[in-house]
Amino acid sequence: MTKHQDTTGRRALLRGFTAAGLAALTGCTGADRQRAAQGPAGGAARPVREPSTYRLRPMAGAGGPRRAAPKVRTAPVLRLDTEPGDRAMALTFDDGPDPAYTPEILRILREHDVRATFLVCGDRARESPDLLRRMAGEGHVIGNHTWTHPLLLKLDRTRIRAEIERTSELIERTVGEPPLWFRAPYGAWNRNVFELGTELGMEPLAWTVDSLDWDNPGAPTVISRVVHRAAPGVIVLNHDAGGDRSQTLTAVRSYLPRLLDAGYRMTVPRPYGV
């Protein structure tokens, strides 16, 4: 049994933390923090668009201009910055890549010509470098989700840095560019995590809506939560690894075209200074 297959045990670890305690760290409250403490209705069928050429290129070339250094934040990014009238949302996927589920997620995204952000764990990414290259080649953003998905609040600075740095190095070796975003496992942040992520050139990314797919509540529950909480600037948390993610596949197949038909635009977060 791998660390990621033992998802139930890892989620249970956080049930000893109060939702209020982690909410103070991240700014999230209520049901959105349940994972750490352990819209529109259907629309008419929409024709599938052909993939556009931008999806076949990374967001920035290895020789492109360097962005400004990120600032040290005291809270993670919870929503996208959107202009009035811009119905932009972001889909994010944690804990992968997984050869059993990630390829189908990528196929669905390609079918609908949208990009997403994948927050990967180093020990899984090491086993599937081809999936990282595919993500980058199809225009998706790859972020850092540590090496082994530990609860960082229990680690000292040296161990936190090793978890984050090792994954960043693997991503850069594999796709040619370092990650610009970091997401703490379980959404558990503290000062050390913010500072070390910034030292390694990344910004902290959280979420607005937890789809609840990590708990396998049934695809209808996942679909309902995403569709009914959709709004401009929302960042949706999904998972493409860490357990049986067949419900996630079913849910994404359903809610993604419904959101697009309702006028939402799926995009990726823009780092500070870009």
Image (cartoon, grey):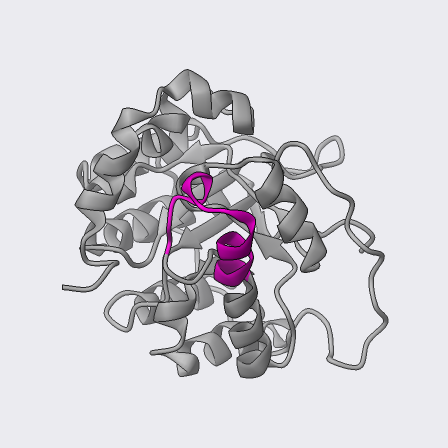
The C terminus appears in which quarter of the rendering?
Answer: bottom right
Question: Where in the figure is residue 146, as x and y percent of width and height?
Answer: 46, 58
- The residue lying at 33 percent from left, 58 percent from top is 240
Question: Where in the figure is residue 15, as x and y percent of width and height?
Answer: 26, 28
- Left or right: where does residue 59 sit relative to residue 25? right
Residue 221 occupies quadrant: top left
- The residue lying at 48 percent from left, 60 percent from top is 163
Question: Where in the figure is residue 247, as x and y percent of width and height?
Answer: 21, 49
Q: Is residue 48 magenta?
A: no
Magenta residues (range):
149-164
Residue 263 occupies quadrant: top right
Q: Is residue 190 visible?
A: yes
Q: Is residue 154 magenta?
A: yes
Name the foreground residue: 273 vs 198. 198
Up-down: is 42 above or below 172?
above
Name the dominant secondary structure of the magenta segment. helix
Q: Is residue 114 visible?
A: no
Name the foreground residue: 9 vs 113. 9
Name the foreground residue: 78 vs 11. 11
- The residue lying at 42 percent from left, 53 percent from top is 93
Up-down: is 248 above or below 241?
above
Up-down: is 70 above or below 65?
above
Name the foreground residue: 267 vs 166. 166
The N terminus appears in which quarter of the rendering?
Answer: bottom left
- Left or right: where does residue 16 sit relative to residue 165? left
